[in-house]
Image (cartoon, grey):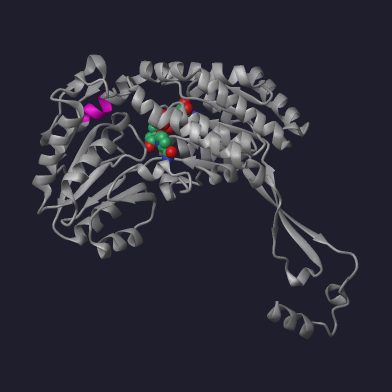
Amino acid sequence: MKNDLDNIINAQRNFFNAQETKSIPYRIAALKRLRSEIHKREADIHKAVHQDFKKSEFESVLSETGIVEKELNLLIKKLASWSRPQRVKSSMLNFPSSDYIYKDPYGTVLIIAPWNYPFQLAMVPLIGAIAAGNTAVVKPSELTPHTSSVIVEICNAVFEEEYVAVVEGGVEISTELLSKKWDYIFFTGSVFVGKIVAKAAAEHLTPVTLELGGKNPCIIDHSAKIKLAAKRLVWAKFLNGGQTCVAPDYILVDNKIKADFIKYYDLEIKNAYGENPKNSPDYPRIINKKNFERLEKMLVGEQIAVGGTTDASENYIAPTIIDQPAMDSEVMKDEIFGPILPVLGYNNEQEIDQIIRSYDKSLSLYVFSTRKSFVKKILSTYSFGGGVINDAIVYYANPNLPFGGVGNSGIGGYHGKQTFDTFTHNKAISKRANWLDAPIRYAPYKGKLGQLRLFLKWF
Ligand code: NAD
């Protein structure tokens, strides 16, 4: 593989240097070919995702192919105008000049994807890389082999390896890829691996986007529409079997309404998945044994208010509520990433503050309340990637909103125009005219300092 990788990277560098990917019609044609291949293979994609972890076709359309399609359509439509050099106001210090930002691709980029939205999280960054004029190597997750195979087939049908290559494999291949010099690295995955990626990138001073995870708080105050909150949170927590980076991780609910919230939540679980969610065609499984066992441990010794049943033979964990876990319990240590929801009651805002501040900055934060002042305070007090008022997750679906973390939950962002911007270097160009050459900047400087100070003050 070592030589293969070097060959692929060299071929991609040569292809990038040949300037073909800088042509706008070339990029648009490539994205259109990709779109039609994805259309052709849509049923195969959904089947593969289902084989990987029993995700329903509905959820696959909603959160895999639907999102990819929207991003493709937007970037195909807009990339010509986004790629144009952008004229900006000139500085009088350089008079006369005209100034521009040229939209430059980075070159050869590496995209490393996780398993939890295995199609979408590999393809959307790839679409951005192509739209911006780069060549790309994509490494899908080894934990979703069926989806990974379809990604290989689609990319092989659409692209030459010198333009886009898919490299399959686990930690070993990923490590090998990270040891190479890239012009940009786009990584989605855990905080732990994010740090490995950042260190590897630092070796070559390669810029990175890190899309990571964290413990996303969800605050429900006493004024919230509690039945609707419960319904929306059942959807948000159990979508993808709870294996979503932007899922609400834990609930902080006013003690006055906590019992009601749990009652409605239980009811909404039954409405969504029936008396036994194991039999529901809409309820996904945990991705593998390791994650199943990690999650199962969180249930031990806890007060289970709802659910709590498991079946190791299917990696099944029922939609579960843990009532009032201790802060040092397994479930409150790290990101849960599964269908287990800890519910913690609070009596006052200081208790909310204490809990949220005991964790690193989260990827998302959700607040359910009809009190404007409370919502305003929560949004302005805490630093987090993005969030929703009176719902959860849905901000992810708006391409006009940038998506990304802050601090421990990530660096950089994408979606919509920001997907294009992420894979684009802003090259600053000043074009000077020759008809005037103000003498002030040239040595000897004697007697010119006063003039300079005046100039700096005015312009
Ligand atoms: P992961 O970090 O284990 O793996 C992600 C990728 O990194 C995979 O392709 C894997 O092969 C590779 N990898 C794993 N170990 C590696 C190592 N030691 N060195 C180099 N590469 C390695 O993450 P995962 O389990 O696939 O995904 C779950 C995590 O991803 C969660 O923490 C979740 O919050 C996060 N996530 C974030 C977003 C986001 O957009 N912010 C989206 C989805 C998932």
Please state the total of marks drawn on the protein image: 0
Q: Nearer the viewer, residue 105 or 288?
A: 105
Task: Write the residue at 54% across / 35% down.
Answer: 73
62, above or below 258, in the image: above
Q: Is residue 278 left or right of residue 15?
A: left
Q: Quadrant of residue 256?
A: bottom left
340, above or below 459, in the image: above
Position of residue 237 measured from the top left corner of the image (x, y, whole percent)? 27, 36
- Report the residue that reaches farthest toward the right: 435
Task: Write the residue at 38% across / 26% down.
Answer: 60
- Asked if residue 137 shows in the view, the reply is yes
Secondary structure mostly seen in magenta is helix
- Asked if residue 116 shows in the view, the reply is no
Task: Write the residue at 20% across / 30% down.
Answer: 272
Task: Write the residue at 61% across / 28% down.
Answer: 32
In what quadrant of the picture does the N terminus appear? Answer: top right
Position of residue 198 measured from the top left corner of the image (x, y, whole percent)? 52, 40
Q: Nearer the viewer, residue 206 or 387?
A: 387
Position of residue 144 measured from the top left corner of the image (x, y, whole percent)? 42, 20
Q: Quadrant of residue 131?
A: top right
In what quadrant of the picture does the C terminus appear? Answer: bottom right
Position of residue 363 measured from the top left corner of the image (x, y, whole percent)? 38, 46
Q: Is residue 435 left or right of residue 244?
A: right
Q: Nearer the viewer, residue 201 or 213?
A: 213
Q: Is residue 293 left or right of residue 434?
A: left
Q: Is residue 264 left or right of residue 193?
A: left
Q: Quadrant of ligand 1?
A: top left
* Residues in magenta, as a range: 293-297
Q: Is residue 30 magenta?
A: no
Q: Nearer the viewer, residue 207 or 387?
A: 387
